[in-house]
Amino acid sequence: MKPIKKRLLTPGPTMVPERVLEALSRPTLYHRSPEFKEVFLETRQLLKRVLRTEGEVLILTSSGTGAMEAAVSNLFNPGDSAVVIVGGKFGQRWQELCQTYGVNPVVVEVEWGKSVKVEEVKRAIEENPGVKGVLVQICETSTGTVHDVRAIGELLKGYDDVLLIADGITAYGVYDIPTDQWGIDVAITGSQKALMTPPGLAVISLNGKAQERLEKVRDRSYYFNLRKEIKQQRKGQTAYTTATNLVVALNEALKMIDEEGLENVAKRHQILAEATREGVKALGLELLSENPANGVTAVKVPAGMDGQEIVRVAREEFGITIAGGQEHLKGKIFRLSHMGYVDMFDVLTGLEVTEFALKKLGYTSFDFGSSVRAAMELFSKKG
Ligand SMILES: *Cc1c(COP(=O)(O)O)cnc(C)c1O
């Protein structure tokens, strides 16, 4: 059967709710208008609720990497050192950003699919006196793995001059994370993952400690100047023209999260993730991650099969876009996303297309329909 519908089950961009698409299509607002100012200030307030922070929350016009770059360029001087947790593609990005800005990365290597051990972070800090920060992913999207950022925050309470900078792009809006309570000094997210908005906006929060650091670092970026942005955004302004339509759309998406309630949003993601894992295991497949995330599930490809083929068949023959692996995991895993505007029927679709694609590619050592049945059992139990 030829697909007539396209479905997006990738870990960003994700599916955008009709309500948000409608908001996106409203006439463009002038970024200095009173009308936009009101939306902008409200959006910052709503973001504070999702991030659960009393810190300063800034909206930047870029993809998520822009906020990562802003963190590195605004919070470190050349020659500073920072501990970088590298357990996947996005950890590598922290490392590369440090190198770009002359920050010495103290790399804690983690096997892809595993979580960093807090003792190793501690050791890295102890062995490198003077490190100015720890850069980590809350969820390493490339492997579908969660790092224990809460424990790292706990550890860093003993170190006054070390900032905890957490990339939570696939964690905020998936989990209910108390940013301030966990001791996250700088939190980062983006519009196109769990925040259910098209790509184009990044978010960065800075608590008091991070803002103090900001004052001690000399300007190194003209566009991503967080001091300038804080001054402007407190007034409902941005330093330069922001993507006003996207802000209006993000505002709508955040209202949806607020209406559902962050706790319920987190619970939904938990159940969707559990169902996906159960479904995959019912096919005799293994998860890549020892500590799997609730936003995306990385699945090991059966021996002798090319994972990229699964992704291709899903897209070309069934109209469903799932994600493959990156770097050395290319062909070795595929990833099913269940973050953002996703419900149980989307999860079932992801499992169904996995089965169809596997069968099509000659993998038949599973009971056809068993993943869907396993997921349905879980849904009917956990509702
Ligand atoms: C998506 C993502 C990013 C940002 O990537 P962009 O393509 O720049 O939006 C950063 N970190 C993680 C963990 C992500 O999943």
Image (tube, helix red, strand yellow):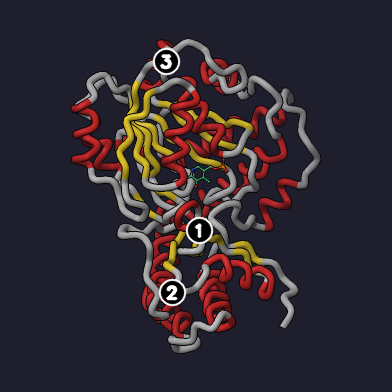
Residue 205, image x, y percentages: 46, 30
Estimate how packed mark 1 is, as few (under 14), some (14 to 19) or many (20 or more) residues with alpha carbons within 10 Å: few
CB-based contact (under 8 Å), mark 1 and mark 3 = no
Residue 130, image x, y percentages: 26, 19
Q: Report the amino acid beneath label 2.
A: Pro
Residue 82, image x, y percentages: 34, 27
Residue 32 located left or right of residue 220: right
Q: Nearer the viewer, residue 222 or 98?
A: 98
Instruction: Identify which residue is drawn at 48% across, 86% down.
Output: 364
Q: Could you say which quadrant of the image residue 162 lies in?
A: top left
- Image position of 115 with respect to 212: above or below: below
Q: Report the amino acid beneath label 3.
A: Asn
CB-based contact (under 8 Å), mark 2 and mark 1 = no
Which label belongs to residue 77?
3
Label 1 to label 3: alpha-carbon separation: 35 Å
Q: Nearer the viewer, residue 311 or 59?
A: 311
Of mark 2 and mark 1, the one earlier in the sequence is 2
Of mark 2 and mark 3, the one earlier in the sequence is 3
Q: In this view, which residue lies farthest toward the bottom?
A: 367
Q: Which of marks 2 and 3 is in front?
A: 2
Could you tell me which secondary element the residue under label 1 belongs to?
Answer: loop
Q: Report the amino acid beneath label 1.
A: Lys
Estimate how packed mark 3 is, as few (under 14), some (14 to 19) or many (20 or more) residues with alpha carbons within 10 Å: some
Could you tell me which secondary element the residue under label 2 belongs to?
Answer: loop
Residue with the mark numbered 1: 330
Instruction: Identify which residue is drawn at 72% across, 39% down.
Output: 245
Label 2 to label 3: alpha-carbon separation: 46 Å
Residue with the mark numbered 2: 302
Residue 337, image x, y percentages: 51, 61
Instruction: Identify which residue is drawn at 36% across, 55% down.
Output: 113
Of mark 1 and mark 3, the one earlier in the sequence is 3
